Image (cartoon, rainbow, N blue to C red):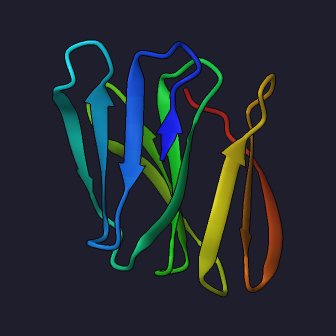
Amino acid sequence: MAYSPDGGYLATASTDHTLKIWDTVTLTLVAHLEGHTGAVRSCAFSPTSQHLVSVSADHTVRIWQAATGECLTALRAAYPLHGCDWHPHKNIITATGVGGIYHMNYLHT
């Protein structure tokens, strides 16, 4: 579970392979994110609150557009992943798992 830095969204990760993004003011569902094929273990918002990163037992890191729920990219690791976070001031994503720690620069165009 993660709050966006601007406080407008709450993202929840689930063992049913999905994430949900909620509006924190209206408490309504903004987006239902599907694409992982394993339990979603962790998620984190970008510093701008525009993007969400998630990691899963399916060995993937996915980056989503927060407002629409569109999956922008998916990267595969060698082993299951269980944690992730976004650097508070840079476009750097860190994911952790059985295989170690992965650092990725994210450049969205």
Q: How many marks?
A: 0
Q: Along the horizontal axis of the image, is 80 left or right of 27? A: right
Residue at coordinates 31% horizontally, 25% vertically from top-left?
67
Image location (x, y in percent) of residue 85: 69, 47
Residue at coordinates 54% horizontally, 47% vertically from top-left?
53
Image location (x, y in percent) of residue 36: 35, 69
Front residue (pair 77, 98): 98
Image location (x, y in percent) of residue 71: 36, 48
Whether 20 is drawn above or below 36: the answer is above
Residue at coordinates 31% horizontally, 37% vertically from top-left?
21
Q: Along the horizontal axis of the image, is 72 left or right of 48? A: left
Quadrant location of the C terminus?
A: top right
Front residue (pair 82, 69): 82
Front residue (pair 26, 78): 26
Whether 37 is drawn above or below 14: the answer is below
Q: Along the horizontal axis of the image, is 48 left or right of 50? A: right
Residue at coordinates 60% horizontally, 30% vertically from top-left?
46
Image location (x, y in percent) of residue 108: 57, 31
